[in-house]
Image (tube, rainbow, N blue to C red):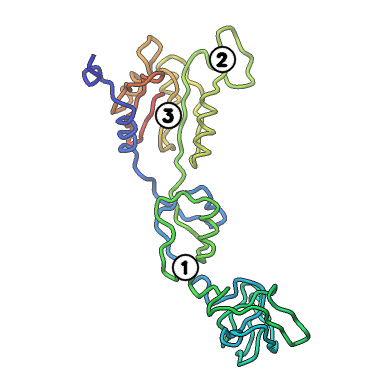
């Protein structure tokens, strides 16, 4: 039988229609400390240049490259530069400054000789290897410049993104609100974990697993409880879906006498986009809109 005439659509088309039927949620502002796992709503540009000035990439000695063309050579140490506490002065011919990783490059210096290639004798420093201009120097703006866009809208923020946004000096981020997904399992045979099982009953495990999956994906799973296989029970529980952004039902999507989801939700205003997908298992799969919200029937 032709799939189109049978109402079947492909898995790829089903995914496409579902994505077309879901609109982005509005945004909210959160602290950078709470941004992990959230989806960025707008692009973000750096508010600072990083590094803000030329700094040393290694521990060693800041020198003028022209002073160490012929080695070994002895220079006079005239000071020290540490991260956050630069050398207040300039380096002249025959001078050097002890420098640590991340410290600003002193005025007059243009290269770093690493500590392993030196020998200190008081304030006299023996330089044992020559260097080129810029060697072991991290220039200003090497990582990024102020105003440079580094985070795109739609990015799901991982730990690296959070660290980057922090380095960009951004304390708050606009992110998409977490989607609230209402989950409704159906079936007279279902009971919650921990309840005693009567003959023919099983644990409602799929609803809790799906809720955990939603939470892991960045949403908020909202379990509505178990609907019995009758219209009144289903209607009563879906009345709690108003605060959710999407409804997902489990069971009751086929064509059996007790498969009531399509019938009841259609009576409640469900506009069905498709209800059969060319796959096994899972052929009866409903997607549509109810009261302006997407609904997925598994």
Left or right, 127 with reference to 150: right
Q: Earlier in the sequence, mark 3 or mark 2?
A: 2
Q: Earlier in the sequence, mark 2 or mark 1?
A: 1
Q: Could you classify mark 1 by the number of other residues whose Cα lies within 10 Å: few (under 14), some (14-19), or many (20 or more)?
A: some
Q: Residue 169 at what x, y percent from top left?
A: 52, 66
**Circle 1 sits on which residue?**
144
Distance from the alpha carbon under mark 3 to that under mark 2: 20 Å
Describe the element under mark 1 as helix, strand or loop: loop
140 or 222: nearer the eye?
140
Mark number displayed over residue 202 = 2
Q: What residue appears at the point 43 percent right and 32 percent down from the top-left corner? A: 241
Q: Nearer the viewer, mark 1 or mark 3?
A: 1
Q: Nearer the viewer, mark 2 or mark 1?
A: 1
Q: Could you classify mark 3 by the number of other residues whose Cα lies within 10 Å: few (under 14), some (14-19), or many (20 or more)?
A: many
Describe the element under mark 2 as helix, strand or loop: strand
Left or right, 16 with reference to 181: left
**Circle 3 sits on which residue?**
248
């Amino acid at each position: 039988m032709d799939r189109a005439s049978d109402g079947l659509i492909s898995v790829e088309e089903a995914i496409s229609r579902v994505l077309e039927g879901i609109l982005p949620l509005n945004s909210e502002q959160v602290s950078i400390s709470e941004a992990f796992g959230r989806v960025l709503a707008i692009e973000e540009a750096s508010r600072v240049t990083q590094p803000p000035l030329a700094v040393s990439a290694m521990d060693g000695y800041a020198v003028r490259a022209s002073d160490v063309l012929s080695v070994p050579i002895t220079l006079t140490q005239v000071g020290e530069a540490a991260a956050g506490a630069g050398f207040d002065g300039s380096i002249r011919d025959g001078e050097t400054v002890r420098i640590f990783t991340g410290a600003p490059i002193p005025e007059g210096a243009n290269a770093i000789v690493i500590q392993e290639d030196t020998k200190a004798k008081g304030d006299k420093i023996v330089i044992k290897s020559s260097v080129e201009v810029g060697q072991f120097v991290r220039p200003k703006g090497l990582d990024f410049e102020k105003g440079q866009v580094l985070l795109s809208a739609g990015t799901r923020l991982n730990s690296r993104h959070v660290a980057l946004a922090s380095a960009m000096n951004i304390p708050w981020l606009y992110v998409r609100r977490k989607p609230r997904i209402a989950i409704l399992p159906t079936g007279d045979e279902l009971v919650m974990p921990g309840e005693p099982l009567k003959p023919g009953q099983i644990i409602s495990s799929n609803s809790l697993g799906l809720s955990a999956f939603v939470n892991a994906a960045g949403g908020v799973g909202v379990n509505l409880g178990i609907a019995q296989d009758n219209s009144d029970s289903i209607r009563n529980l879906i009345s709690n879906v108003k605060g959710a952004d999407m409804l997902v039902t489990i069971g009751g999507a086929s064509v059996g006498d007790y498969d009531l989801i399509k019938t009841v939700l259609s009576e409640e205003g469900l506009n069905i986009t498709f209800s059969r997908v060319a796959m096994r298992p899972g052929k009866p799969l409903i997607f549509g809109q109810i009261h302006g919200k997407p609904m997925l029937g598994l």
